[in-house]
Image: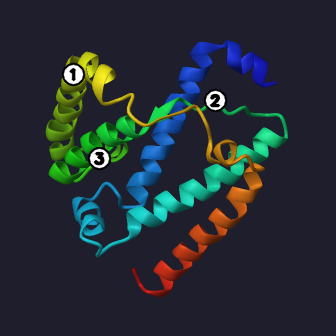
Amino acid sequence: MFSALHSNKSLQLVIGLGIGFFFGFLLQKGNVTEYDVIVGQLLFRDFTVVKIMVTAMVTGMVGVHILRELGLAQLHPKPGSLGMTLVGGLIFGVGFAVLGYCPGTIAAAVGQGKMDAAVGGLTGIIVGAGLYAHAFPYLSRTILPRGDFGAQTFPELLRVNPWVIIIPLSAALIGLLYWLERAGM
């Protein structure tokens, strides 16, 4: 069933585009395309973004591993390092703090017709990608390889069954969601 999909790149693009539109629709319905919601999160006043992200993390983590156990999915983790995490976090954080959008919410806000996302966000993405591409040769020799941890998942790193991580982490994250709701955040 999935082998036909795996070999059909055009169909994969169409499905990806459809999922992207659906994701943007959900971001808009969740109000995370609103500047006040994003800034409220940064100021620890509105936890809508955390609630959406934690819900997505638990759903994705459990769903992917169920599909994996059923033989319907495979994990292909990318290599990582502390240097990559630092540079990526700085780029993401600066853009997020300056404009109040992340790349996903920029796309959703542009689709909603918000000019600040269309002008500032898209310009920021293009300029930021260009600057990163220009700096990549230097970064790849100096900062990015620092603290290399390879292409491992946490369960592989700890040499445990994935569910040993998934079950308590999901319970803790669901507990966080419950606490945020009860606290009115």
Residue 88: which numbered mark, if any? none
Image vertical order of residue 172 relative to residue 147, above or below: below
Side (left or right) of 20 relative to 131:
right
Quadrant position of the N terminus in the picture: top right
Chain-order first, disc 3 or disc 2: 2
Q: Amino acid at mark 2?
A: His
Residue 64, how many percent across, how many down? 69, 44
Q: Residue at x 30, y 30 (%)?
A: 143
**Pointer 2 or 1: first along the chain:** 2
Q: Residues within 10 Å of mark 2 (few under 14, many from 20)?
A: few
For label 1, the residue is 135
Residue at 50% x, 43% y: name it: 22
In depth, the one of 20 and 128 nearer the eye is 128
In the picture of the structure, the residue carrying the numbered disc 3 is 109
What residue sits right under mark 2 in the picture?
A: 76
How far apart, in angstroms, are the residues tagged by discs 2 and 1?
Answer: 27 Å
Q: Is residue 184 toward the left or the right of residue 65 in the image?
A: left
**SS for dot 3:** helix
Structural distance between the alpha carbons of marks 3 and 2: 31 Å
